[in-house]
């Protein structure tokens, strides 16, 4: 496996800045998820690591060596795309074997068979090796695409939203498989997604990109609980974090320069109706594990979640407490105000 480092990397496409002075390090054997909206520069970052794009400035290092001018075929990285990109006229076995039969990596057929069978067992695809690629389900096709990268034993795996084309059940199954594979092979993985569930369940660390810039990197717990800026706070959390105006609070309790006060829905405390700060209940959603309430005060919505069964009804007045220890304060430019 290998370490990856991006040093002050920038990439433009005409007037568009896709990656803007990005510095990022990925440790040997680490699973880093790059999370951000469409247009944040996620895929361009992967392509810069792979060598499919060259940076306008800065350097890409693999295992401490500058790879900026190294041809993609010499970087020993495997790229797994959103679409499966299998060879439809080949069997599963031959799709998996294809990288080992290429002129640059040609192996003996005995080695090819042993390696393909080992990877197929790892992916629970042993019974499908003789099937044509077109006869597989979407989840099986994505397993083969991942397996085709695994047989090569590259130094780095780059994954560009590999699960986004699958339905919810298959995505959940393959998330488990990817985490298990990472623990088994100890691979260095850089994984791109816009899905916060994938990010929080898969990542050792999450790197959040906005407009080509890295706004925060840390463990899922760090990014969720201690966001560095407003965009990071909004990127994780379902339902999303509450964003409230400073006027919602006692002015003496809000730091100077505060433009937005934020609190996670699970940190909103529901009290008896006769307590201070009553809000009107607009929407109530019950689920087996968590109940969601959308409350309102003078047109400002507040979302709360609770696991406690209560007899609420729309239009009812609900007492709410917003604990000071759970409040996050942000300036108008999105920067966090330390407290």
Image (tube, rainbow, N blue to C red):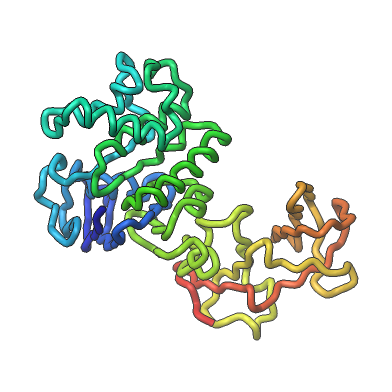
Q: Nearer the viewer, residue 230 or 309?
A: 309
| Residue 322 vertical position relative to residue 76 in the rendered view, above or below | below
Q: Nearer the viewer, residue 125 or 288?
A: 125
Image quadrant assignment for residue 320: bottom right
Extreme residue in the left direction: 69
Residue 99: tell me if it is visible: no
Residue 109, image x, y percentages: 20, 25
Q: Nearer the viewer, residue 141 or 268?
A: 141
- Residue sitting at x 83%, y 75%: 276
Q: Is residue 1 left or right of residue 70?
A: right
- Residue sitting at x 16%, y 42%: 72
Extreme residue in the top direction: 89
Residue 232, image x, y percentages: 47, 61
Q: Nearer the viewer, residue 93 or 288?
A: 93
| Residue 256 vertical position relative to residue 101 in the rendered view, above or below | below
Q: Is residue 225 left or right of residue 91?
A: right
Residue 278: tell me if it is visible: yes
- Residue sitting at x 35%, y 48%: 185
């Amino acid at each position: 496996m290998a370490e990856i480092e991006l040093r002050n990397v920038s990439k433009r496409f005409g007037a568009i800045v896709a990656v803007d002075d990005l510095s990022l390090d990925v440790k040997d054997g680490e699973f880093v998820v790059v999370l951000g909206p469409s247009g944040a520069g996620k895929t361009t970052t992967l392509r810069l690591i792979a060598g499919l794009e060259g940076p306008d400035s800065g350097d890409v290092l693999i295992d401490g060596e500058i790879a900026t001018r190294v041809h993609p075929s010499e970087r020993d990285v495997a790229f797994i795309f959103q679409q499966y990109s299998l060879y439809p006229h080949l069997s599963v076995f031959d799709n998996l074997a294809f990288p080992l039969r290429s002129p640059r990596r040609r192996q003996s057929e005995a080695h090819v068979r042993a390696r393909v069978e080992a990877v197929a067992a790892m992916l629970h695809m042993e019974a499908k090796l003789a099937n044509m690629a077109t006869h597989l389900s979407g989840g099986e096709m994505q397993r083969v695409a991942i397996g085709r990268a695994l047989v090569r034993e590259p130094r780095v795996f780059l994954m560009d939203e590999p699960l986004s084309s699958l339905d919810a059940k298959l995505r959940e199954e393959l998330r488990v498989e990817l985490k298990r594979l990472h623990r088994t092979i100890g691979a260095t993985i850089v994984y791109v997604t816009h899905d916060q569930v994938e990010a929080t369940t898969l990542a050792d660390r999450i790197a959040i990109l906005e407009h080509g810039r890295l706004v925060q990197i840390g463990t899922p717990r760090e990014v969720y609980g201690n966001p560095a800026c407003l965009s990071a706070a909004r990127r994780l959390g379902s339902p999303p974090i509450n964003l409230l105006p400073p006027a919602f609070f006692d002015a003496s309790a809000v730091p100077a320069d505060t433009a937005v006060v934020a609190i996670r829905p699970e940190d909103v405390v529901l009290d008896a109706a006769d307590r201070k700060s009553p809000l009107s209940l607009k929407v109530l959603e019950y689920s087996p594990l968590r109940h969601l309430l959308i409350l309102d005060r003078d047109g400002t919505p507040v979302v709360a979640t609770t696991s406690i069964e209560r007899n609420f009804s729309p239009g009812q007045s609900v007492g709410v407490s917003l604990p000071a220890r759970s409040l996050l304060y942000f300036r108008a430019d999105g920067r966090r105000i330390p407290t």
